[in-house]
Amino acid sequence: MTPQEARIIANYLTADFAQEIPTTVRVLEAAGSDKLSYSPDAKSKTGLALVRHVVLIDAWFLNSIADGAFVGGNTDESDACGIMTGADGAAKYSATVPAALARVSGLSDEKLAEEIDFFGMMKMPAAMLLGLAVKHSLHHRGQLSTYLRAMGGKVPGIYGPSGDSQ
């Protein structure tokens, strides 16, 4: 991949991620606080664990791309992270994810074309890893949105009105 190709891809994917941020914030806000212990089964994360995961991993993933290396991956998703409600998650997401996305946008074309090792599973240009970041974010946001009604909340419009937003 040439640096110019990497820039084109990165511009598209950073704009795509940026467009999803307000929707993700609305889903986080809708998670509330009183029923975040909900989980559909023993193998699934709780609502609170999903809120924390979306917030912390989205920022970590983007910052890892900006840093040119995926180190760790075990973010502290315990109470020590300070996210105890959907509102806490929405506030932290609003503060950290746009800043991390700006870091990626600010990378040089050459840095966007450089391959990054993703935990020994694959290597791909930084620009292409943005696609994985978008997919990961939307996957877990979708999980959380399916929990909302069971947690007593309302599902906000995501790609148009929901049954709760009409």
Image: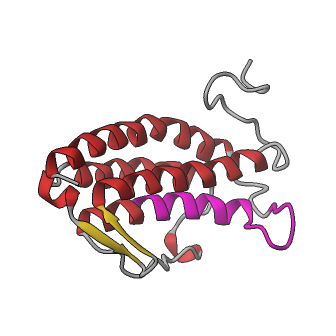
Which portion, as a residue range, is magenta?
38-59
Residue sitting farthest toward the top = 166
Is residue 113 shown left or right of residue 99?
left
In the rendered view, tell whether residue 13 sits above or below residue 164.
below
Q: Dividing the image into 4 quarters, which one contains the C terminus?
A: top right
Q: Residue 14 in the image: state x and y as whole percent.
A: 33, 43
Q: Residue 105 in the image: state x and y as whole percent.
A: 23, 48
Q: Dividing the image into 4 quarters, which one contains the N terminus?
A: bottom left
Q: Residue at x 48, y 38 (%)?
A: 20
Q: Residue at x 76, y 46 (%)?
A: 146
Q: Quadrant of residue 4?
A: top left
In the rendered view, tell whether residue 75 sits above or below residue 84.
below
Q: Residue 96 in the image: state x and y as whole percent.
A: 37, 55
Q: Quadrant of residue 19?
A: top left
Does residue 32 appear in the picture of this structure? no
Q: Residue at x 28, y 46 (%)?
A: 10
Is residue 20 shown left or right of residue 40?
left
